[in-house]
Amino acid sequence: MARPRTGWLAVVSLIVGCSTGGSGSEEPTAEAPDVSTVTVAMTASSEPDTGFDPVYGWGSASHVHEPLVQSTLIKTDVDLGFENDLATDYSVSDDGMTWKFTIRDDAKFTNGNTVTAKDVAFTINEVVTNTGAVADLNKVKEATATSDTEVEIAMKQPDNTLLYTLAVLGIVPADEYGDNYGKNPIGSGRYKLESWEQGKQAIFVANPDYYGEAPKMERLVVVFMDEDAGIAAVKAGQVDVAYVSATHADQHMDGYKLFSAKTVDSRGISFPVVPEGSPKREGMDGAEHEVGNNVTSDRALRQAMNYAVDRDVLADHVLNGHGTPAYSVADGMPWASDAMKVETDVDKAKTILEDAGWAEGDDGVRVKHDGTRAEFTLVYPATDPVRQALAAEFANQMKEIGINITIEGKSWDDIYLIQTTEPVVWGWGSNSPNELYSLYHSQSTSNTAAYESNTIDEYLDKALAATDIDESNEYWQKAQWDGTTGVTPEGEATWVWLTNIDHLYFVRDNLNIGEQKPHPHGHGWSVVNNVDQWTWES
């Protein structure tokens, strides 16, 4: 969630002297005088609340990214395949209950100590046992160092998505970890944290003792500011890279190009599928919440909205072409189901409603025989103009089939209170199939639709337990639709997926930011995953 920040003028004035784009004079310049430094403007909400601590979510929170300061056991390449980082080898038992990793013996923390299996086991166990931890290791029982270079992970239940989490979980030193670690992190990654001025900026410098290829970009300055301030900093030539949303991207910036990163970052609407008064559920905030909505609990209504929405209009006009239609949380991924994709068919939507007893009322809003009107409030985060625009256009489109929607912006704190009683425009997307489990398993706290199906739970559990990736993907797909049961528009239609969002950045013309792997949900740190490979071109 975004937090109040100091004014952007103060932040920009702070970075003028260190920015690659400013010389400290009155006139900004589009040239970069320091080829070893880059300055990146990120949204204020990108600043980690608890510092650069992997246990509390640095790298491994809901917006996953590489932790930079720390090494990880495994990493992913640009095609999202797995590669070794600290690990030199790994294996999993036939029953999926034991993982074994061998780690390299030449990695050192920035305090000079060698990274050992003890540190790996400590990090994993700290996440497992710490109630404030964020990384998803809930299926891990315990990690044990069996030697200086070997560690075993015992599972509570099989989880073949474990590697995706380990690829973003930075390893911390067992003997140096404490309450202040987030402010003064010790790691073995490509960079060291040189300084952090909370609410303003963080500066990273290349780690001279890094065991891998030395970073080409020696210094990274990250300034935290709201989008408008970031755009102003671009206009002033004071930052080299700045995030911009689709609604503000079509403006020309002298000395900068618009860079579009492909993503797995979907926007969709969750609809409570049970009526009011249903048993309370634990939500994403860990609290118990009321559950149910007497309008959206009607399956025909949800199905009709899935067929009536014109996703092309949303992508082309609301996103100004900086996105694509979304049909699921996993479009384009190996675990996606083709059954989630449906074409816009307003006539079919109307027929579904009429067959289910939703008759058109005198004012154009459909009404059921019991007097229930086809109208509800759609909630979006008040600080997100893109979700607001998507909500407004969706509401406008639904008028054609007789559904009246009022949109309302709320704070995240307020959204969590109504997450299982009102439809909400959410952002989801990850390089891991575990998001399907999060959204659709009956025991998941992220299942805001309150959807429960023993059949789907069984598919999801089998998907996690499978040690063969192809077999696993088959179960992930069946969990979406097996021909008779599932969450597709033809089935329970628990969500209406709207668009996939491209991540957009203004990038200085002579800065090469390399080949970017697909960005997951969240538009902060993912862009600097490969900052060590960035270069200035003459």
Image (cartoon, grey):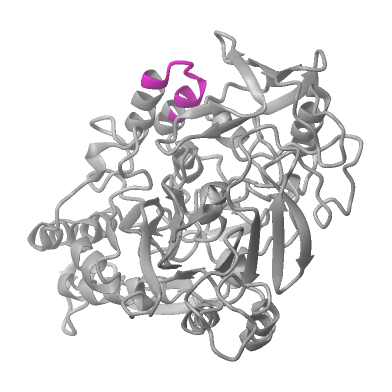
Quarter of the image that includes the N terminus: bottom right
Vertical order, 377 against 280 (above or below): below
Q: Nearer the viewer, residue 347 or 124?
A: 124
Quarter of the image that includes the C terminus: bottom left
Vertical order, 312 against 457 (above or below): below
Magenta stretch: give its range: 460-470
Residue 432, horizontal then vertical, whole percent: 47, 38
Q: Is residue 369 visible?
A: no
The single residue placed furthest to the front in the displayed view is: 538
**Magenta stretch: includes residue 461:** yes
**Magenta stretch: includes residue 143:** no
Residue 524, horizontal then vertical, whole percent: 54, 60
Q: Residue at x 56, y 10 (%)?
A: 95
Instruction: Tell me if 408 is positioned left or right of 405 in this view.
Output: right
Instruction: Tell me if 104 is positioned left or right of 484 in this view.
Output: right
Q: Is residue 492 visible?
A: yes
Q: Residue at x 65, y 53 (%)?
A: 218
Q: Nearer the viewer, residue 410 or 124?
A: 124
Vertical order, 312 against 454 (above or below): below
Q: Residue at x 51, y 35 (%)?
A: 76
Residue 149, horizontal then vertical, whole percent: 77, 17
The single residue placed furthest to the bottom in the displayed view is: 26
Instruction: Tell me if 36 is positioned left or right of 259 in this view.
Output: right
Q: Nearer the viewer, residue 87 or 522?
A: 87
Q: Main secondary structure of the magenta part?
A: helix
Q: Quadrant of residue 197?
A: bottom right
The single residue placed furthest to the left in the displayed view is: 347
Residue 344, horizontal then vertical, whole percent: 14, 58
Vertical order, 261 against 162 (above or below): below
Q: How many marks?
A: 0
